Image: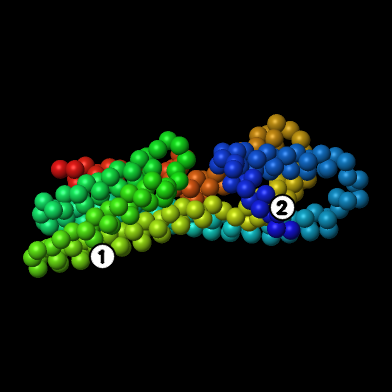
Amino acid sequence: MIGPSLKGSEMYESLSTASVASIIFACTFAAALLGMLLRRKLPAPHWNEDSKDVMKLVMGLIATMAALVLALLIASAKSSYDTQDAELQQVSATVIELDGLLAHFGPDAREARRRLQSVVSAAAEEIGSKDEVRLGSPASQVEGKTFFDSIQNLSPNTESQRFIQKRAFKIGAALRHLRALMISQASISAIPWPFLTVLVFWISVLFLGFGLFARLNAIIIVTLLMGALSVSSGIYLILELNNPYHGLMRISDAPLRKALAEINH
């Protein structure tokens, strides 16, 4: 049981957002066409008023569940996107504060400031890359460790410098914690594939019912086509918001670039 589940999850994660949305569009529209085909094949006794009433009740139930789940997913995805965007802005502000502290330490902190610039530059390159972003690469982790070592290696001579070193180390630790949180959020942001499969099944059943009640003509085809496109584009939007570090709606690296320009002065 475990093996097939892992393979299904890996297959889903390997697909692009556009590919998943296209598959959902194809499933829903094909279900509607299948419903119209079944309408022509089913004998007349199956189309009595009792059958139609039951079908309408079931379709109403499925439509309500699907609408609630879609609304919940959109709200959750938007909240997650805004949270990670705010975290990136917080990181940028913290970097500027940390560089300011090290500047007040004096010339001995020049190496630590250079290491900080290197860490921020690497992070900005990761987020701004056109390729799929993988936060927390081994190279960036090494840069981060080297920066912390440079803070620890500072030799304060005055009470003010000792305070700055402690404060810088505390802010740096908070920054590392926030960075680890962002990496964790980025790695688990995708919607679980069983959840998405069930949702697509509900929507496909709903479109199958639409097809059963519809007579084949150009207006009906276009209407069902637009409905399937609307549903798939809604799920596309959810998937994009759940992957904020790549795709069309990726988080901007502008805050980090601005912080990097600030600390390079």
Q: Residue at x 38, y 42 (%)?
A: 126
16 relative position to 176: left or right: right
Mark with earlier residue (2, 1): 2
Identify whether 29 is placed above or below 241.
above
Percent across and percent down for residue 117 are 25, 46
- Say which residue label 2 marks: 4
Q: Mark 1: few, some, or many residues within 10 Å (few <14, many ≥20)?
A: few
In the image, is 27 to the left or to the right of 135? right
Residue 242 appears in view: yes
Type of amino acid under label 1? Lys
Q: Are marks 2 and 1 in contact (CB under 8 Å)?
A: no
As drawn, the residue found furthest toward the top would be 218
Q: Is residue 159 above or below residue 235?
A: below
Q: Which residue is mark 1?
A: 170
User: x and y percent of residue 20 in the render?
Assistant: 61, 42
Residue at 22% x, 46% y is 114
Q: Quadrant of the C terminus?
A: top left
Q: Position of residue 124 (x, y in %)?
A: 33, 43
Residue 86 in view = no
Q: Quadrant of residue 172?
A: bottom left
Residue shown at the point (13%, 62%) measured from the top left: 156
- Pinpoint residue 243: horizontal percent, then vertical percent: 48, 48
Q: Which mark is residue 80?
A: none
List the single residue furthest toward the left: 158
Residue 5: quarter of image: bottom right
Left or right relative to 162: residue 85 = right
Q: In what element is the residue under mark 2? A: helix
